[in-house]
Amino acid sequence: MGMLDGKIAIITGATSGIGERSAELFIEEGATVVLAGRRAELGEAIAARLGQNASFVQADVGDEADIKALIEGTAQRFGRIDVLFNNAGHGLPPFRIAEADIATWDTMMSVHVRGVVIAMKYVAPIMQKQKSGSIITTASVAGYRAGGSSHAYSTAKAAVLHLTRSVAAELGEDGIRVNSISPGAIVTGIFGKGIGLDPNVADQELATLEARFTKAQPIPRAGVPDDIARAAVFLASDGASFVNGADIVVDGGAISGRPFSQGVGARKEMTEAISKAAQGRK
């Protein structure tokens, strides 16, 4: 038996990275999955590869009509929705606040916050009628710590963290669990897309990221989409039946601080510099 046997799930942002791997793993664990994304040709190809328990719906999470059709269409087709995984997102290069482009800021909020609210709005009545369901949203460690991502991305993910808690307090009374996952440095195309690369190119240029991310956290390897997908499977499963309003940080320990050896090395360099300066004053 799989952890998700018989469950009906929707995954947004399912045409690459975390969303694609989550769709694969959900199906391996027994779920029927509706993949959603903007790239229709790619989405159809992934769904065909995953087999009869996968289907694709083209949808832009920033478009309320698209999301309404996605969710209501899934409910009509299968009679229920057990899991909604709000995973769609995009990156943005850091900028100084005095140089903020407000249209770009609004787009970031539309995708990462407004899109999540829209999806919750339309799935909530369906799950309330069932008296069950799991809503999962991809947040980020950027929602906890400043300086590592753009102001817009960090702010959007902080909003997602609190939105999760707020909606969990409401829907928990109806037997619906609302949780989030905060990835750390995960090797996906979002970074390349954030600097303007074509999405299909960005999804292929991952070797550089993997090399850089190996030392980004105490666990000495880069994070991969499978790490997040497995956390999503847990939150979607009945094994998480008493988990509500929580955020699972999956970052190899990065949020705890830099690797211990790096701290030791930095302190040694500082000690040597102070000693050298002191010797020079004698």
Image: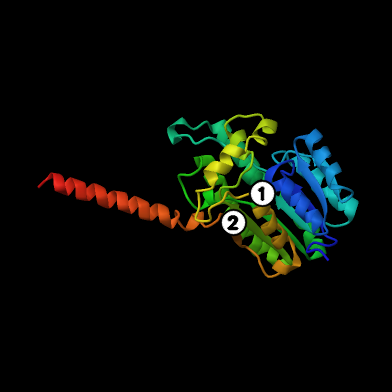
Q: Amino acid at mark 1?
A: Pro
How far apart are the two marked residues, 2 and 1, measured between alpha carbons?
A: 11 Å
Residue displayed at 66% across by 49% down: 225
Residue extending farthest to the bottom is 242
Q: Dot 2, crowdedness within 10 Å: few (<14), some or many (≥20)?
A: many
**Circle number at residue 49:** none
Q: Identify the image quadrant of residue 194.
A: top right
Q: Dot 1, crowdedness within 10 Å: few (<14), some or many (≥20)?
A: some
Q: Using the image, determine if residue 45 lies above or below residue 31.
A: above
Q: Which of 42 and 49 lies nearest the eye of the viewer?
A: 49
Rendered location of residue 66, percent (x, y): 77, 40
Residue displayed at 79% across by 39% down: 43
Mark 2 — residue?
250
Q: Amino acid at mark 2?
A: Val
- Evaluate whether residue 200 shows in this view: yes
Rendered location of residue 217, percent (x, y): 50, 52
Rendered location of residue 229, percent (x, y): 69, 54
Rendered location of residue 221, percent (x, y): 56, 51
**Circle number at residue 225:** 1
Q: Earlier in the sequence, mark 2 or mark 1?
A: 1
**Picture quarter with the N terminus:** bottom right
